Image (cartoon, grey):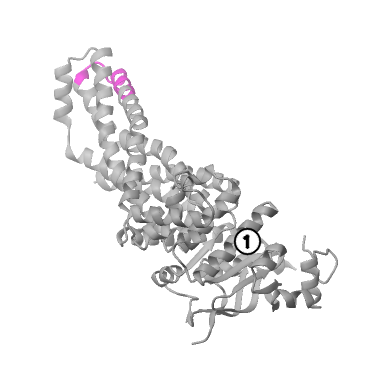
Amino acid sequence: MLLHAIEKFLRRQGKPLVKFVTRIGELSIFIAQSLYHSVTPPFYGRLLFKQMIDIGFYSLPVVGLTTIFAGMVIALQSYSGFASFGAESTVASVVLISVTRELAPVLSALMVAGRIGAAMAAEIGTMRVTEQIDALVTLSTNPFKYLVAPRLIAGVLVLPILVLIGDVIGIFGGYVVGVYKLGFNPANYVNATLQELQALDITTGVVKAAVFGFIISLMGCYNGYKSKGGAQGVGTATTNAVVSASILILIFNYIITEVFFSK
Amino acid sequence: MSDTKIKISGLKKAFGKKVVLDGLDLDIRKGESLVVIGGSGTGKSVLIKCIQGLLQPDAGSILIDDQEVVGLKESEKEEMHSKMGMLFQGGALFDSLSVWENVAFGLLENQKMNKKQAKNEAIRVLRQVGLAPDVADLSPSELSGGMQKRVGLARAIATRPEIIFFDEPTTGLDPIMADVINDLIIESVKGLGATALTITHDMASARKIADRIAMLYKGKIIWQGTVKEMDKTTDPYVCQFINGCSQGPIKVEV
């Protein structure tokens, strides 16, 4: 009787754990397959190009708006924080460092995750539940090569470019607030920015962006690919894609920062 | 070399505790049109998916042209698929591509035909299934259900496969359109000399397109024979199914 109760208890407690481990295993296999099919022919160049336009070009307005306001608010905040002494160079360097290291990569990635991760999960999920993925297979086309690989490669290639553009726009936002609102001398502000500019800051931002791009595409494709059960399933997949990508972006942001900057 | 195109023996597939296929045996001869009938949820779709390698069976063997296809590697599966075509129940047309790109998909992606040639070929096949060339540039979502079925059929036969699968080809169509699709199926299968496997619960369609009928019940083929034999049979399961009675040995699981 007691044994039975214990067994029942353990069974109930263990279920989520088993589910979790299953998920991790499933995801690992998915990643391995995706990577393998990303580097073996046939390649679909046309689809890769289309994804790069979708993820990159059409995300420019969102990324531009996000980073310009981020740069502006940082200029304002840092001025009110350390206003008294050497304000120009302090504000310039705070804007530079926070935009290139953190704000441009993280905020851009989160925005793109909402825009692109959701779209990928919805598109691939719909293809799954309407049997279009099965149809691909019966037409001798590997869905990993046709659907997943172009999105993954495009994510890894395009996010760094977006972030570089975001860097420039964010710093420009800081400049606008510094010069037109706080009354700094434009030449001094630009000089201070250039003096503080370091390759490492830009590099870490770009590395982060590549990792984030991978995460966004992976979560979009994975959740879409595994979705089941009609419209509701696709809805769940879309939500999961965005939420899991966002959380993973924040976690990996910390890990990468730790790797680059902790001594 | 036998004249058996597909030989299935002892096929088993379960999802969790639910056993769907329970040691199924079935032979399909070269060039014949076999229709598998059976109630909803008896595993007809699972059977087709196992043959195509979309699902991995738990046990059993499937020989196509005397070659084992259970447990093939991915690259070998692709080769196997190149001799198959499939008409999906919901069409499963790629909605990001135009009608002709759907039809020519296999030609463009695998046979590496050039674009112009592929488009001409697609239009030829579309005409064969009774669609005018001007639908070629439309998107699949702009078509009616019957037209989508025709495009699906065109896509299935465009690569001139040796085996064609039809998953409930007439479901969701009005009786006249259903009969038109039946005619097209017969025409295209005979035209290609292909082996056809259809699953359906539409008896009118089954009678029309079948050379032979097999009935699936509780994961096994419980009866098979020609349409004539089916009408004469005293098998209570078959009689109940083809006459559509709620009373009989088959219990509807609610």
Q: Residue at x 67, y 66 (%)?
A: B208
| Front position in the image: A161 or B134 | B134
Q: How many marks?
A: 1
For mark 1, name the chain. B
Q: Residue furthest right?
A: B247
- Residue A62 in the image: x percent, y percent? 37, 31
Residue B71 visible within the image: yes
| Quarter placement of the N terminus of chain A | bottom right
Residue B19 visible here: no
Q: Is residue A84 inside the magenta stretch?
A: yes
Give the labeled residue for mark 1.
B182
Q: Nearer the viewer, residue A20 or B91?
A: B91
Residue A242's x, y, as percent?
46, 42
Q: Is residue A85 placed above or below A222 in the rendered structure?
A: above
Mark 1 lies on a secondary structure that is helix
Q: Position of residue B225 (x, y in %)?
A: 69, 78
* Viewer-closest of A72 and B227: B227
Q: Is residue B193 magenta?
A: no
A221 vs A90, left or right, is right
Residue A100 picture location, percent across and down: 26, 34
For image coordinates 15% across by 28% down, the residue present is: A194
In the rendered structure, the answer to whether residue B198 lies left or right of residue B137 reads right
A218 vs B65: above or below: above
How packed mark 1 is, by other alpha carbons closer than 10 Å (few <14, some 14-19, many 20 or more), is: some
Amino acid type at mark 1: Asn
> Residue drawn 32% across and 29% down?
A64
**Which portion, as a residue range, is magenta?**
A73-88
Main SS of the magenta part reads helix
